[in-house]
Image: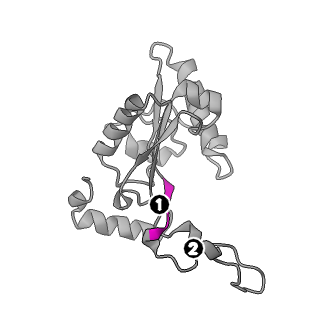
Amino acid sequence: MELVGIENEEINKISKDGVKVPFMKPLKMASDKVQEIEVVLHIIDWLKENEKRKQYDLLMLLQPTSPLRATEDIDKAIELLFLKKAKAIVSVCEVDHHPLWANTLPEDGCMKDFIRKEIMNKNRQELPVFYRLNSVIYLSYCDYIKEEKSFFGEKTFAYIMPRERSIGIDNEMDLKLAQILIKNNISNFLKD
């Protein structure tokens, strides 16, 4: 396994156990203000410049904040890339809360126009299915990322994952939920 672009020496020491770390990510790329695609483009450029004996056609971004993906998800995303003749695959899952039941509020909190009239009294099952990015798998041809400056474009397709494997760890509550699932043997969740 190759891990590219670590910016923290402490993380680097931990990850070296069984993982090749070809370079440290520049500190200027470690800021919260740096867009993720900038880091991905930097990695592609670095690999092209420094790994001349190995050229990479595909890049898969697996964020550590989404630890519940299964190897089967990775395999299926790769299969889907070739099956669809896609240039990129991005994982999604069904939304937890329907976006048609969400809106902004005016300053006075009035909910007069909060829900559109055509869906006012509909049951959830009557509404169209919506999906959200789950930040679990981003797979793309390197040249497509460079061309689009994104994983998204005309040739990007969705890999649909179950919600229980789509948990992203963004806060302490998410971490506790992931720990509970792992502790209680989520092997049943890790298979479709």
> Which is nearer the N-term, disc 1 or disc 2?
2
Residue corresponding to mark 1: 129
Residue 78: where, in percent of width, then height? 37, 34
Quadrant of res 41: top right
Does 131 appear in magenta? Answer: yes
Residue 182: where, in percent of width, then height? 28, 62
Residue 66: where, in percent of width, then height? 42, 54
**Which amino acid type corresponds to the residue marked 1 in the rendered image?**
Val
Q: What is the magenta range?
A: 126-133
- At x 49%, y 57%, the residue is 131
Residue 168 relative to residue 108: left or right: left
- At x 63%, y 42%, the residue is 29
Does 156 appear in magenta? Answer: no
- At x 36%, y 64%, the residue is 178
Tag on residue 119? 2
**Which amino acid type corresponds to the residue marked 2 in the rendered image?**
Ile
Quadrant of res 155: top right
Q: Is residue 26 visible?
A: no
Residue 67: where, in percent of width, then height? 37, 53
Q: Is residue 24 visible?
A: yes
